[in-house]
Image (cartoon, rainbow, N blue to C red):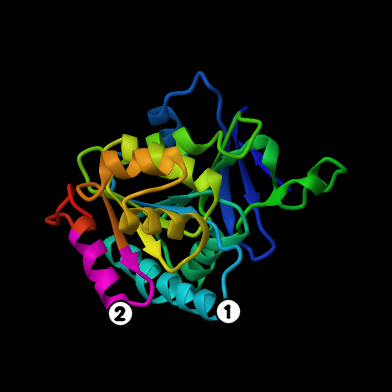
């Protein structure tokens, strides 16, 4: 069961033996305060992972697993950076956590999610049955006071920006739906470059299609493209050699890499 260390910060243990700090954030807390309470200190380079993994073919899912296991987790571990994501045990967020376990990663993995939408390990109530599990390979969680999925979007974006400080930071969008689109918009608004993974399905592919066709039925997608493509928003095709993705991310995230282009 969780142990209380402050009135807002607890430590919980998952069934796999992994311990994680869980902070119940409030609107009165600054982003710097949140990070400090979780033991995360600026400036630290970071990667923000947004999206989902719904309606994907088995071939695409296998390819996507390789992205996490052979590119993202090993690179993050090598560079010693922090990863921020949605924290739930599903989709690409689950893949990120599992990849950390596969590579025996020691890097910080912070999940950001609404308090009302997730449950702690061993939390069994009628209300909690409707909530999502937290992914058990994360090292910390910031549970924000929102009531809906998407409430966490500005928190995720601003926590990554605050943590990065003068260090590099990049967003990777995979698959996803409306919440992922809100995440992308919030992250780009901070000035952080973003890479959309083409071929991963749903919202990611809708954005790529709109880029290539120079049009979109969705005004939000059209606005994002007009404001950020190609100087901050770029595309990587899932069918391309994954070594090329690793190279691009290394250029952005390495201390001597480029911050302003993805």
Q: x, y percentage for residue 98? A: 54, 68
Q: Residue furthest top?
A: 28
Name the residue: 47% across, 72% down.
64
Residue labelled with disc 2: 241
The answer to whether residue 40 is visible is no
Residue labelled with disc 1: 58
The answer to whether residue 49 is visible is yes
Name the residue: 44% across, 77% down.
66
As rendered, which of 72 and 11 lies closer to the eye? 72
Q: x, y percentage for residue 48? A: 39, 50
- Compared across the picture, whether 94 is left or right of 45 comes to right
Q: Is residue 42 above or below residue 123?
A: above
- Check residue 61 for magenta coloring: no
Q: x, y percentage for residue 208? A: 37, 58
Sequence-wise, which precedes: disc 2 or disc 1? Answer: 1
Name the residue: 40% across, 67% down.
73
Q: x, y percentage for residue 52? A: 55, 58
């Amino acid at each position: 069961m969780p142990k209380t260390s402050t009135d807002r910060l607890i430590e919980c243990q998952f069934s796999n033996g992994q311990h994680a700090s869980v902070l119940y954030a409030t609107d009165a807390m600054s982003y710097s305060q949140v990070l400090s309470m979780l033991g995360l200190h600026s400036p630290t380079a970071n990667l923000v992972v947004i999206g989902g993994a719904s309606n994907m073919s088995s071939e695409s899912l296998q390819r996507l697993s390789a992205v996490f296991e052979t590119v993202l987790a090993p690179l993050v571990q090598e560079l010693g950076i922090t990863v921020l994501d949605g924290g739930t045990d599903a989709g690409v967020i689950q893949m990120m956590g599992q990849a950390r376990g596969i590579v025996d990663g020691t890097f910080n993995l912070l999940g950001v999610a609404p308090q009302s939408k997730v449950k702690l390990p061993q939390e069994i109530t009628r209300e909690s049955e409707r909530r999502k599990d937290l992914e058990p390979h994360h090292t910390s969680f910031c549970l924000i006071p929102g009531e809906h999925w998407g409430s966490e979007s500005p928190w995720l974006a601003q926590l990554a920006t605050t943590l990065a400080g003068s260090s590099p930071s990049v967003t990777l969008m995979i698959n996803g739906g409306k919440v992922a689109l809100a995440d992308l918009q919030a992250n780009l608004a901070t000035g952080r470059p973003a890479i959309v993974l083409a071929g991963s399905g749903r919202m990611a592919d809708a954005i790529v299609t709109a880029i290539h066709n120079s049009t979109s039925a969705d005004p939000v997608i059209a606005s994002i493209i007009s404001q950020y493509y190609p100087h901050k928003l770029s595309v990587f095709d899932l069918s391309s050699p994954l070594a090329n993705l690793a190279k691009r991310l290394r250029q952005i995230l390495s201390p001597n890499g480029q911050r302003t282009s993805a």
